[in-house]
Image (spheres, grey):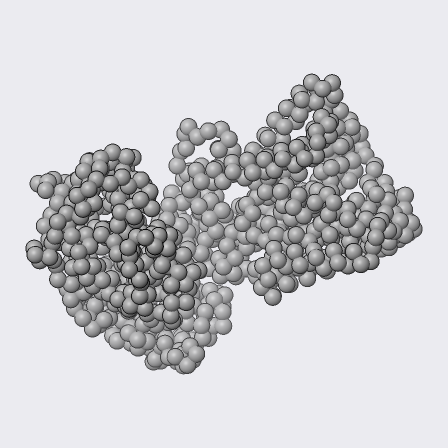
Amino acid sequence: MMGLTDEAPTVRMLGIGKQFLGNPVLRDVDLELRAGEVHALVGENGAGKSTLMKILAGVHRADAGTVELAGETVSFGSPRQAQAAGISIVHQEFNLLGDRSVAENVYLGREPVRRGQVDRKRMEAATADLLDGLGERGISPRTAVRRLPVAQRQVVEIVKALSTDARVLAMDEPTAALADHEVELLYGLVNRLRERGIAILYVSHRLREVFDLSQRITVLKDGELVTSLPTKELTADQLVRHMVGRPLEALFPDLATETECGPVRLAVRGGGNARLSGIDLDVRAGEIVGLAGLQGAGRSAVARAIAGVDPFTTGSVEIDGEQRRIDSPRAAIRRGIAFVTEDRKGEGLALRQSVRDNTLLVRRASFGRARGLGALDLAALLRSVTLVSRGPDQEVRYLSGGNQQKVVLAKWLAVEPKVLVVDEPTRGIDVGAKKAVYDLLRGLARGGVAILMISSELPELIGMSDRVLVMHEGSLAGELPAGPEEETVMSLATGHSTAEAA
Amino acid sequence: MAAGSTVAPPRAGKRFATVLQPTAMVYLALVLLLVAGSVLVGIQGGVLLDQGGILNILTRSTALGLVAIGQTMVILTGKLDLSVAYLIGLCSLIGAETMAGDPNMILPAVLLTLACAAAIGLVNGLVITKLKVNAFIATLGMALIIRGYLESVYTGPAGDVPRAFQHLGYDRIGPVPVSALLMLALAAAAWWYLTRTKGGYHVYAVGGDEEVARFSGIRTDRTIIKVHVLCAVAAGLAGLFLASRLGSGAPWVGVDAGYDLESIAAVVLGGTLLAGGRGGVAGTIGGVLILATLDTIFDDLGVTPFFKDVVRGAVLIIAVALYARRRGLHR
């Protein structure tokens, strides 16, 4: 049944080349997708992954090379033609209407019609069948999508793609919007699709997913094929080296030495609110403290409380040894607390404004001239965060995720914070940009900033933190020194053990 | 078999008003208003809902209802049509002047009027979709153009509506005007179109998210043009109705009644989201009836027009605030 090699590939892309305005973005790339196989496509942003995917899905037309579907050469002029041939995309950003029902979304633009009316019964029955087929019985076709949790919206998105009888499914960062426990659900779904003989092209920045799910990995770099190997024959280290030309450990800068750590800058004593209780923590100048825990354990709630978004209602907060009342983001900012939120596009940036306006946003909003901040050299600031843009006038929505995150960081650096709280600072950005963010954070710590860092990616949290605090159900479950084992963190996070409190 | 009952988390203890669908809220508010109005008018020795009162409310509702039905479709796609008020005046003139007192000209006049209205809606739609002009500006521009034409050509009422056509405006069955029934029939047709047909589904999709609609293979431009044509035709019908009431065409009949902003107010009062994608005709008719009832109550009470406007404004703001709160709770 699983004769992977003797069967002809479902899709064969040969010698694909593509230019945009004279800039080559793909050169001579080959890709083969087989029925019942998950094929991971990895590479940094700008490596050409999405262009390749869009050529497959009929959004772009290749300048060179051929695409074969089941042995026949095809050339799609539009996504509709590709869809009709059985190739569907699951988009990174949800393509769903919140106010419409699941069934209405699945059949959007292709509603079945009977005697002049939309055949709602048939539409809902067919949607229910598709959901059943994926083992997703918890979703009613009549529910408004707005009322579904994010993971189930992802399922709806996949059902929408499948409803066209897809034989080939291209998934673009399907977990970008999902929480950890939701990712598990997606794994099950992808595996069921694979068992049904669908060929899956899986684009992701998360290496763990790539190894958990795929049978074959293709690496692109600068528009060229680096390698294409069975997943079994690769290790994470090799993969990262293929992608960026560096090994994995080299991504993380050195930890702080004892002499680099100064006095306590941020102290929370007995902090609590509706979601938190008894939070005691210290962050010293020059130190990066990691905050670990399962989704929903209250990591983000701590960050939002310190930043004054959802303030502590009990306990006290001290900055540089002085007790401060922090009841709004403005109060927090004026005390020197900066907060990089996990929702970069929703809460971190004014997407339609320029790099300059975003960078100066906090500075203009919360500080008068009298605050004693020196003149700001915008160009130098943007250089220091290694931003790549067309200039300070470019709207940030046109930047890559990594560069957007650099703008968010620059926005906070512009006000020279004492305490920096970062929530998922590398979510959805490529390996190269991750490295840049790591270096930036460590550089800030060296400059005396106290950093509290939250990340769902444990290797990242462990690699970056001088100390790790672990949360469980709204409280701190324990503290671990630098470089703990993942299992130790997880057993604290799941409440299986309690470590000695600091 | 309520939609979503299987998945939606239980929301026990939510206050009554926040649980109801907007449409139900509108009609509940209408009933409360009728009760309160009856009491208030009764205290002053009058009767709100006698034959004259019902007739008054329904007559007031007819022209506004016609415009608001069209406006609902436009707003559901996330656009606005500000040209309807002047268009109503223009259409009343085209109708009355073409009829020129000749009963044989009724049908050609109606067809010509609606064709002109449709043409103006088409221009609106094309300007918005092809020239990428924001709907607010595009239709405001169209309003100014029509106003300029009306001001340069007309100084007052013109044309003559034959007696046969005036029946449309004045005939009634009991206390119910025939024209109000026609308006409700049009509302029913619009409701059917929006909730049952593919085209209607696409109206909601375009208003919900134009990009998502486009990526799903919907020809969003066509949908937007279509709703603007339908809205203009609805305004044309309102113009014809007003001409039959007045016996002639009147350039400022639409503007004086403020049908542009009034129709938007009725739609929003009826629970349709100004941003589009959510709402419907049923709520709009409720909104129209509320506004007409308020007017009738105030007339019966002899309240000054200034106070009237204050109350109408307050009602509108409170209604939208309630909807916003309800939406917030469901996030």
Where residue A231 sits: x, y (%)?
A: 22, 66
Residue depicted at 49% across the width and 40% down the height:
B324
A223 to the left or right of B110: left
Compared across the picture, whether A2 is left or right of B329 comes to: left
Can the viewer see residue B167? yes
Residue in the picture at 69% in, 58% down: B142
Residue A357, by quadrant, is bottom left
The quadrant in which the C terminus of chain A is found is top left
Residue in the image at 41% along x and 63% along y: A354
Residue that lies at the very extreme toward the front in this rendered image: A370
Foreground residue, B261 or A8? B261
Residue A420 drawn at (x, y percent): 24, 52
Residue at x 26% of width, y 44% of height: A306
The quadrant of the image that shows the N terminus of chain A is bottom left
**x, y percent for residue B11:** 41, 33
Q: Is residue A37 visible?
A: no
Identify which residue, B142 or B156, lies in the foreground: B156
Numbered-mark total:
0
Residue A224, quarter of the rendered image: bottom left
Q: What x and y, as percent, mark residue A52?
A: 37, 71
- B151, B194: nearer the viewer: B151
Closest to the observer, A253 or A292: A253
Decide if residue B167 is on the left or right side of residue B203.
Answer: right
In the image, residue B78 above or below residue A85: above
Q: Compared to B59, does A246 lie above or below?
A: below
